[in-house]
Image (cartoon, coloured by chain):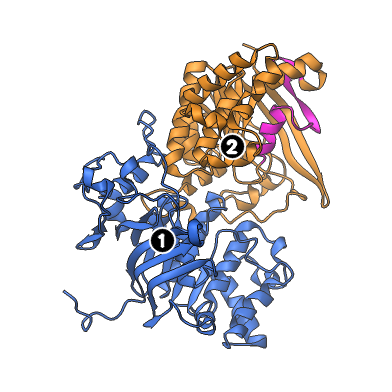
Amino acid sequence: MTALLEAERLAVDYPTSHGRLRALEEVSLALAPGETVGVIGESGSGKTTLGRALAGLVRPRAGEVRFRGRPLASLDRAGRRALRRAVALVFQDPAGSFDPRRTIGESVAEPLTVHEPGLGAAARAARVLEWLARVGLEPAHAAARPRELSGGQCQRAALARAMIAGPELVICDEAVSALDVSVQAGIVALIAELARERGVGFLFISHQLAVVRRLASRVLVLYHGRVLELAPREALFGAPRHPYTRLLLDSAPSLDGPAASARLAPPDASSPFARAPGCPFAARCPHVEARCRERVPPLERIGTGHEVACLRQAELEPR
Amino acid sequence: MRSTRMTPEPLLALRGLSVTLGRGAGETRALEDVSLTLAAAARLGLVGESGAGKSQLALAIAGLGGPAARVSGSIRFEGAELVGAPEPRLRRVRGARIGMVFQDPGSALAPHLTIGTQLAEVLVAHGRARGAAARAAALAMLERVRVPDPAARLGQYPHELSGGLRQRVLIAMALIAGPSLLVADEPTTALDATVEAGILELFREAGSAGTALLLVSHDLAVVAGVCEEIAVLYAGRLVERGPVRAVLATPRHPYTAGLAAARLALDTPLEAPLVAIPGQPPGRGARPAGCAYAARCPRSLPRCAHEVPPLEAAGARAVACFAPLGAGERP
């Protein structure tokens, strides 16, 4: 099956006053239609950049993104329009992603005015109400301004806006991170339902591992812009191979007491402008050897859909 | 029941604490009649949703609510009343006896001063040390909070440090004068989990070294990892408190139970239902006459709508609910 979106050896730089910031290096990922893939990693790992690059919002320095097999750089106007319709985005800041002067209904309707310009006003309004209801909002919310909604309600509206023109993929960048847990569970449930009943895929970018585990069937682990591990959910959470993945899992807050990772690895003290050669995690890795600092470990396939970039992965104790 | 002669006065005692914000028609209550105590070297976690009043409570104790926040009731700290105390005395308490750490480590440090200068300044301001002695104490403090390469950090500016390192520096500043109480408001919320674990360890260590902790967090796990006791705020009122393990294992207030059930963990079964708490907390200006949680509560009784349940203690635990959960009962 042709991937809906595919990144191949993608590299993205950001020019800054300190020099070129290397946000992504050699990232390859194919998203099948309807699948939900999670992206995890610490801040600065390149999670957001990957989402933006897949949506065609940043231009890569090297490598390419293909939409249904066609490189984004080669798309004509109609192709770019099809991409924008197929790929919707939901961001972290619920209120900030809406125009404060427009009503929620106007904002939710916006993708329809772009992608279905022939639709009459009454039909458009009906679709808005249908989607507000689907995400658990009231008809009255259509006339409300963003500031009148709570964070959870805004995020429901953002999902309605993302879904209304029938996308094939929704990129959620920390979409539930700013919400209270009592509200978050409802949004996570809504995303799971939308994925199931509409067959839409999600790229779910989050630092909250438990939420990613709940939603994603595959998970990509990024560090310093590189893929360290890519695995099906069961393997990633049940049998993680990369020491960095293990650090992330051990750091997840738990009600059982302090995280085991408190002294497992020193914090990241490196500069994103001067990357050392070798494995990006070498400076923090408890299993580091001299050879790890010499070259970047290649991603190796170690199981079905399971790839890991660690020279020592075969020697590490399984768990 | 009262045995003031037998038990020494707690380090911190809040009694009937209320905080009112705004004036006239815009007047709202951020905190309503909160009473709780904290013993010396004890670690208490304060949890609740956004808008519950957690930060207002932390600010009130630190005397930093500002002119907009009118505080009534009593805050006794080290045997003296803080509510209504003159500002010069509050300034002596702040920093010297009560250390404070807030969420955003970026804005709490002066951008134009080196780390060493800012640390030493705390000691100078409280007349504890100056010059080379203050400098040496600053270095020792950075070592204690495990800032790597501490000698070099003294000469660096805040922007040269990562978020996690800046938060360690802030904890060093909060602890350098040897306070008996550390008030930390969402100190790890802006940090990665890998960094958070190390910061939380510092709070546990400070407790072991004799500094009491009031830790404000929206995250039950943060409190579970650091504190011995937990207090749950809802819409400005304390609804439950007790030993953290007991409260999380057998929550008695339906809100506490709802919070714990809504939380996803890495070992939550994938097929377990996702249980959000329906609705949202009432805004500060729209608190109902009775229990503020009644509209969202699956156990609410008719009286909950017009009567505020008092916080009633039983042993080490206390709950403010007319229909509390029994041991092991689900809401």
- The residue positioned 66% from the left and 24% from the top of the image is A110
Q: Spot the orange chain and give its letter.
A: A
In the image, A272 versus B107, the foreground residue is: B107
**What range of the chain is rendered magenta?**
A46-71
Task: Name, please, the residue furthest toward the left.
Answer: B1
Q: In the figure, the blue chain has which letter?
A: B
Q: Position of residue B45 (x, y in %)?
A: 39, 60
Residue B116 in picture, x, y percent from top left: 67, 75
Q: Nearer the viewer, residue B145 or B37?
A: B37
Tell me where residue A95 appears, x and y as whole percent: 59, 41
Identity, as a three-letter code, of the amino acid under mark 2 = Arg
Where residue B312 sits: x, y (%)? 22, 60
- The dot on residue B31 is 1
Which residue is tagged 2? A145
What label does residue A57 carry, if any?
Answer: none
Which quarter shows the C terminus of chain B?
top left
Describe residue B219's horizontal placement relative to residue B95 as left or right.
Answer: left
Q: Secondary structure at mark 2?
A: loop
Dot 1: element? strand
Identify which residue is drawn at 70% across, 40% down.
Answer: A296
Left or right? Give the position of B27 relative to B316.
Answer: right
Q: Quadrant of residue B54?
A: bottom left
Amino acid at the residue labelled 1? Leu
What is the chain letter for disc 2?
A: A
**Residue A5 vertical position relative to residue B331 in the rendered view, above or below:** above
Up the image or down, B191 lies above or below A85; here it is below
Residue A318 can be seen in this image: no
Task: Count residues near mark 1 (Cα–Cα under 10 Å), then give few for <14, some for 14-19, many for 20+.
Answer: many
Q: Is residue A93 above or below residue B153?
A: above
Instruction: Please tell me if label 1 and label 2 are on a single chain.
Output: no
Report the Cα–Cα distance between label 1 and label 2: 28 Å
